Amino acid sequence: MQSQKKYSPTFSYEVFPPKTDKGVEKLDATVERLTAVSPEYVSVTYGAGGSTRERTFDTVFRLLDRGIDAAPHLACIGSHKEEIREILEIYRDKGIKRIVALRGDMPSGMGEPGDFRYANELVEFIRAETGDHFRIEVAAYPEFHPQARGADKDLLNFKRKVDAGADAAITQYFYNADAYFRFIDSIEKLGVDIPVIPGIMPIQNYQQLARFSDACGAEIPRWIRKRLEEMEEDLDAIRAFGREVVMDLCRRLLEGGAPGLHFYSMNQSEPVLGMWKELKQSVQ
Ligand code: FAD
């Protein structure tokens, strides 16, 4: 875990495109508050199969209008090359410089898979179509992707995305710092040397977190689960404990050489802002 140390830590965060006018207002307020801590960029999720296409555009363009470096996610499963080409052109024309390139997950029972099977094919396509215009971020899974056919295969599949032209990666969230450090060691042994930014999920609501974690294969360690279960509906207690756990994790990651942190904001400023201010002071 040596080579990640050469980067000075970056702070960035993810939002999702809101569905309602009220959601748009709330997101505007969140972005306003988080702008105070100068994020490197803000990434915007995208529904596989193009399900949030227009809303993702709207959110990305609203961020651009405020002078924020917006990084749209682009999920390729269920899409054809023509659609992806068109989206890339729109982003390039708007001055977007960074894309988070993903496979995505097709909602069950939905349509045909399209022209792309895996994210490495999307990365390759973006490079073939647009050269070096975009900085390409891809997803990484320190606890391995839930559909991986084995840990080593998953690592090799991660390397395919880097070989195809990815510049950096953002991880799925995790609460076990050792999984991250072990992942970095493993990819370095494969000759991969791009920044891998830990994705950080604040702990706000246990039921929601448990649901997400089951779906995406992120592990909530038993000792954290047990404590959160005991707190039942006591949101203040959950948030205070969650903040302590996540702050410890962030500190360990930065001290261990992580090149930055990418927060899953869930369109809320509070949990991120408090932690971020404190962490920024400690790395300056
Ligand atoms: P891939 O890298 O293609 O990997 C998917 C699986 O296939 C893995 O098990 C891998 O081992 C295997 N694999 C990869 N390449 C090959 C190959 N060439 N041959 C055989 N097997 C292979 N989803 C969305 O829909 N929208 C979003 O906005 C979104 N944002 C995300 C942001 C981050 C930071 C992360 C970590 C995930 C995000 N996701 C999003 C979820 C992501 O789309 C899912 O986890 C999806 O299941 C995998 O996407 P991927 O890009 O990692 O896929």
Image: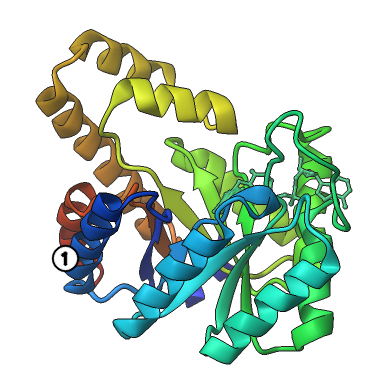
Q: Is residue 120 left or right of residue 199?
A: right
Residue 62, percent from left and from top = 36, 74
Residue 253, percent from left and from top = 40, 53
Residue under the point 27% across and 35% down: 245
Q: Name, please, the residue furthest toward the left.
A: 236
Count of labels in the image: 1
Q: Name, please, the residue furthest toward the front.
A: 21
Q: Is residue 56 left or right of residue 12?
A: right
- Residue type at mark 1: give it: Arg
Quadrant containing the C terminus in the rendered view: bottom left
Q: Is residue 80 left or right of residue 227?
A: right
In this view, the residue in front, 84 or 147, is 84
Residue 88, percent from left and from top = 68, 78
Q: Quadrant of residue 260?
A: bottom left
Q: Is residue 164 visible?
A: no
Residue 128, percent from left and from top = 84, 82
Task: Please give the residue where the numbered disc 1 appears in the rendered image.
Answer: 33
Residue under the point 62% across and 45% down: 141
In this view, the residue in front, 265 or 55, is 55
Residue under the point 39% across and 28% down: 209
Q: Is residue 96 visible?
A: yes
